[in-house]
Image (cartoon, rainbow, N blue to C red):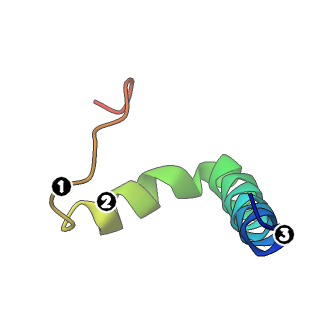
């Protein structure tokens, strides 16, 4: 693995963490509804 790859993965991970924090305030359902128009997204268990 190259350093650039690791840095990219770390950046993506940090972005995901930031999103998760935002979602904790009930933003998750809003986002899922907004993404509901996106076909081909895997359904997460417990999402109805």
Q: Position of residue 3 (x, y in %)?
A: 84, 69
Nearest the camera: 13 or 17? Answer: 13
Q: Which of the 4 image quarters holds residue 14?
A: bottom right
Q: Check disc 1 and report the residue beneath it.
A: 40
Question: How many marks can you see?
Answer: 3
Q: Which element is circle 1 on?
A: loop
Q: Which element is circle 2 on?
A: helix
Q: Which element is circle 3 on?
A: helix
> Residue placed at 63% from the left, 54% from the top?
23
> Residue placed at 18% from the left, 67% from the top?
37
Q: What mark, if any, has residue 3 been given in the picture?
A: 3
- Quadrant occupied by the C terminus: top left
Alpha carbons under labels 1 and 2: distance apart = 14 Å
Q: Nearer the viewer, mark 2 or mark 3?
A: 3
First in sequence: mark 1 vs mark 2: 2
Q: Check disc 2 and report the residue beneath it.
A: 33
Number of residues whose C-alpha sits closer than 10 Å to that of mark 2, classed few (under 14), some (14–19) or many (20 or more): few
- State left or right for residue 42 relative to residue 3: left
């Amino acid at each position: 693995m190259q350093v650039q790859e690791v840095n990219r993965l770390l950046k993506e991970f940090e972005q995901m963490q930031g999103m998760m924090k935002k979602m904790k305030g009930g933003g998750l359902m809003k986002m899922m509804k907004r993404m509901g128009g996106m076909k081909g997204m895997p359904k997460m268990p417990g999402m109805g």
